[in-house]
């Protein structure tokens, strides 16, 4: 549906682990620009890619993605 947004914590998870966009993209088998589009919310991942991201970061998919904005850290 138009206007439906998917929020994510990809940039935060990458920063925590010291992983570059390019390194993440190579691990997922996507172009590094795709990681940027995902992080900025300009592209919603397929279910397969969402699951691959959660596997890569070793967290449940709902830690990476949400249909509601994530609360700010420290809030």
Image (cartoon, rainbow, N blue to C red):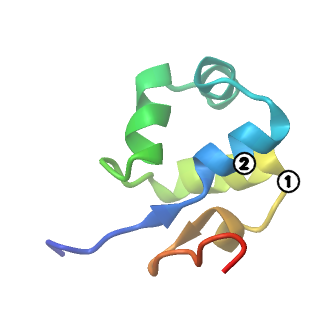
Q: Residues within 10 Å of mark 1 (few under 14, many from 20)?
A: few
Position of residue 3 in the picture relative to residue 7 (left or right): left
Which of disc 1 and disc 2 is earlier in sequence? 2
Q: Residues within 10 Å of mark 2 (few under 14, many from 20)?
A: some
Position of residue 43 in the picture relative to residue 64 (left or right): left
Q: Position of residue 73 (x, y in %)?
A: 68, 70
Residue at the spot of label 1: 58
Q: Which residue is at 46% across, 66% downward? A: 7
Against 46, residue 6 (above or below) is: below
Position of residue 9 in the picture relative to residue 18 (left or right): left
The image quadrant that residue 11 belongs to is top right
Mark number, residue 17: none
Q: Secondary structure at mark 2?
A: helix
Question: Could one spot residue 31 in this view of the protein?
Answer: no
- 50 or 32, which is in the foreground? 32
Question: Could one spot residue 67 in this view of the protein?
Answer: yes
Position of residue 5 in the picture relative to residue 54 (left or right): left
Residue at the spot of label 2: 13
Q: Which residue is at 57% across, 66% downward? A: 65
Against 39, residue 23 (above or below) is: above
Q: Secondary structure at mark 1?
A: loop
Q: Position of residue 74 (x, y in %)?
A: 72, 74
């Amino acid at each position: 549906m138009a206007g439906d947004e998917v929020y994510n914590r990809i940039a935060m998870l990458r920063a925590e682990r010291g992983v570059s966009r390019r390194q993440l993209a190579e691990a997922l088998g996507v172009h590094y620009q795709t990681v940027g589009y995902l992080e900025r919310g300009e592209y919603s991942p397929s279910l397969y890619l969402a699951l691959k991201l959660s596997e890569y970061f070793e967290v449940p998919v709902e830690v990476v993605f949400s249909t509601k904005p994530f609360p700010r850290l420290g809030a």
